[in-house]
Image (tube, helix red, strand yellow):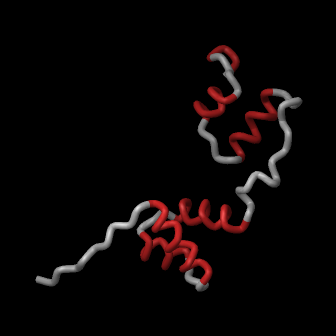
Amino acid sequence: MSTKMQVLLNKKEKEKLVIQLYQEGKTVRDIASAAHVSFSEIGRIVKKLDGSASGENDINLSNKSKATQAMHLFKSGKKPIEVAIELDISAAER
């Protein structure tokens, strides 16, 4: 019986490992396997690293309709309940 030592990494350590492997040119599949994180988590970390999630591209939607704001939130990956809470939409408006 072979025993495989498994090292448990906290969230910050996993993020550092993902960044290191990404910068080494590893594939998403290789990174996911090595760091034990999902493809979507890798995408989130890489976007943050590349500056796409830094808020620089955020648009001011406060003067837009709730429908436009909702579409923007859906596009950014929010769930319907999160959109309703953020925009303070009542059940009748949904």
Height in image: 83 above or below 33? above
Quarter of the image for residue 20 reads bottom right
83 to the left or right of 4 = right
Q: What is the x, y in percent for residue 88?
A: 68, 22
Q: What is the x, y in percent for residue 3?
A: 17, 80
Quarter of the image containing the N terminus?
bottom left
72 to the left or right of 88 = right
The total number of labels drawn is 0
Seen as rendered, the residue at the extreme right is 63
Front-lying residue, 26 or 18: 18
Q: What is the x, y in percent for residue 39?
A: 53, 65
9 to the left or right of 77 = left
Quarter of the image containing the C terminus?
top right
Q: What is the x, y in percent for residue 47?
A: 67, 63
Height in image: 91 above or below 1? above
Tell me which residue sits at (64%, 46%) in the image. 77
Height in image: 43 above or below 68? below
Tell me which residue sits at (59%, 38%) in the image. 79
Front-lying residue, 19 or 88: 19
78 to the left or right of 4 = right
Quarter of the image for residue 87 reads top right
Tell me which residue sits at (84%, 31%) in the image. 62
